[in-house]
Image: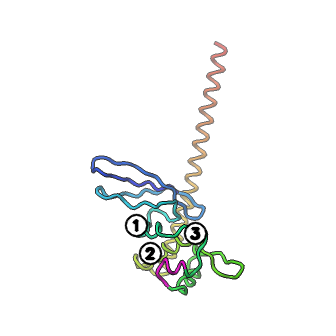
Amino acid sequence: MMMTTMITNDPGTLELESSELSLGDQHVDFVEEAEAKSIPVMASAPISIPAMLCDDKLLEEINAIPDKMGFKIGDVADILGIKQYVLRYWETEFEILRPKKASNNQRMYTRKDVENALLIRKLLHRDRFSIEGARNAMKELKAQVRKEKDMSQVFHKLENFNEKVDDLILDIRRVRSLFK
């Protein structure tokens, strides 16, 4: 997903900056507006959370995630500031939070899992969603991302078709010029 953020140092000028975001393997375009006098916090790397749910504090938390291949449940609990049993409970309630299990049956969270857990914590603790409300918000978001991904694929196919038509027109003009 592309996140286009308006950045301004001067109220009279606007600069657009894009960064890629993804929700799993779903991609979609979202636009987030910045206030005229402040520069928003930007993710240092592509993140897995849609722009419409991100705020400055969440982006700061995501940027603070250590750059590791995998995280044990204790590491994730420390990052989130919650107990391990809460994470295990969230795994039963949110299908987006499904860490892999190592051969010794320990949960191994990816960076994407940690980002999703941060989003879940934000929805539950800061935004005051109920478990069911947060789960429904995540499902609606996933459906919206899927719908917009389909639309972007159609748009991409139309662009390819237009390019082929333009090439065909050029070929026809070349053939015409040969017979003049």
Residue picked out by circle 2: 122
- CB under 8 Å between callouts 3 and 1? no
Across and down, in percent, residue 80 comes to 48, 78
What residue type is disc 3 on?
Lys
Up-down relation of residue 84 to residue 69 (above or below): below
Real-space Cα separation, disc 3 to disc 1, in angstroms: 23 Å
Real-space Cα separation, disc 1 to disc 2, in angstroms: 10 Å
Dot 2 alpha-carbon crowd within 10 angstroms: few under 14, some 14 to 19, many 20 or more: many
Dot 1 alpha-carbon crowd within 10 angstroms: few under 14, some 14 to 19, many 20 or more: some
In this view of the protein, which residue sits in the foreground, 41 or 51?
41
Q: Quadrant of residue 167?
A: top right
Answer with left or right where residue 18 lies relative to residue 24: left
What label sits on residue 55 in the rendered view? 1
- CB under 8 Å between callouts 1 and 2? yes
Real-space Cα separation, disc 3 to disc 2, in angstroms: 22 Å
Answer with left or right where residue 179 lies relative to residue 141: right
Up-down relation of residue 131 to residue 156 (above or below): below
Up-down relation of residue 162 to residue 173 (above or below): below
- Quarter of the figure that contains the C terminus: top right
Task: Provide the residue span drawn in magenta.
Answer: 75-82
What residue type is disc 1 on?
Asp
Across and down, in percent, residue 6 comes to 38, 53
What label sits on residue 68 in the rendered view? 3
Q: Specify whether residue 138 is painted magenta.
A: no
Across and down, in percent, residue 53 comes to 44, 67
